[in-house]
Image: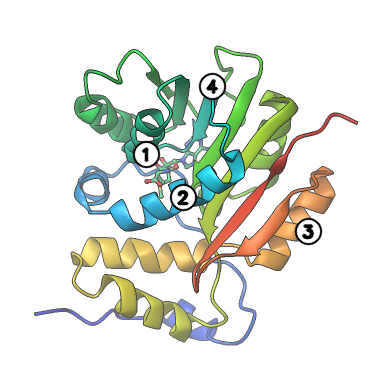
Amino acid sequence: MIKKLEISSEHQYNNHRLFQRILEPELMEDSKQVQAYAQADFSEPNEYFLQNLKALIGMIGFEGYALDLGCGPGDISCRFAKAYPSARVDALDGARAMLDYAESIVPSELSARVCFIHGKLPTISLPRRRYDLIFSNSLLHHLPEPQALWNFVKRYAGNGTRIAIMDLFRPQSVQQAKEIVEMYAATEPEILQRDFYHSLLAAFTPEEIEEQLREAGLNFEVERISDRHVFISGTFIIK
Ligand SMILES: C[S@@+](CC[C@H](N)C(=O)[O-])C[C@H]1O[C@@H](n2cnc3c(N)ncnc32)[C@H](O)[C@@H]1O
């Protein structure tokens, strides 16, 4: 039987248009949560992310060093490495349990090109000073302070680095968040439904992301690409 998602009184209080974001825990360290997330089938959104990333990269393809921020169980890092055989990927996550899972599933033919790094942005120092491509899926909404991501991007991007970031955006009400969960995750385990719901409430609106980019001095495009996803892309130019 599918259990209906219950909304707490705090969330009901916020059930009005343009409600404030409600933070969720930054790192995904709880073992049950990691297991449920890592074993869930995210092939559809992950492929969707990759399609958008490929459109940004274009026909010429990609050679060089890519950085995956908040890589979680590493599915997107590996899909990317498979799609671009001349690419190397440094994949960063602050949750050791996520990386343990990622390291256990990386196919042997990719292991020389995909390097998982345990550390938390913005304080971690990465092995390279610059990356040719920086991408990230579903990290931004975890951050209490969004400029942590944009400052980190500026720190590791060089002239011409391409940027591709996908995240959820916050719906207009908690009721709408609940409807999205029911529409896309009704048959998922309850822990995943709950995480998805909390992620929607913690996410930024596209307008808030545009404001963050203005504040950071980054000229990237912000596009709603589905009823719940926003895609932020562009090329980093040193002025
Ligand atoms: C929702 S998961 C997304 C994982 C993966 N990108 C995907 O699309 O499947 C977000 C990940 O970001 C990680 N994370 C959150 N804040 C972080 C930070 N400040 N530095 C590094 N990783 C962080 C979490 O531990 C979690 O694994």
Q: Give me the disc on residue 51.
A: 2
**Residue 122 position by quadrant:** top right
Question: Does 88 sit left or right of 59 as displayed?
Answer: left
Q: Residues within 10 Å of mark 4 (few under 14, many from 20)?
A: few
State the image coordinates of residue 142 (x, y, percent, origin top left): 50, 50
Which mark is first along the chain, 3 or 1? 1
Question: Any atom of ligand 1 within 8 Å of the CB at mark 1?
Answer: yes
Q: Give me the disc on residue 63.
A: 4
Which mark is first along the chain, 4 or 1? 4
Q: Give me the disc on residue 72.
A: 1
Most distant residue in the left direction? 1
* Residue type indicated by callout 1: Gly
State the image coordinates of residue 201 (x, y, percent, origin top left): 50, 68
Q: Give me the disc on residue 171.
A: none
State the image coordinates of residue 57 (x, y, percent, origin top left): 58, 39
Who is closer to the viewer here, 60 or 207?
Answer: 60
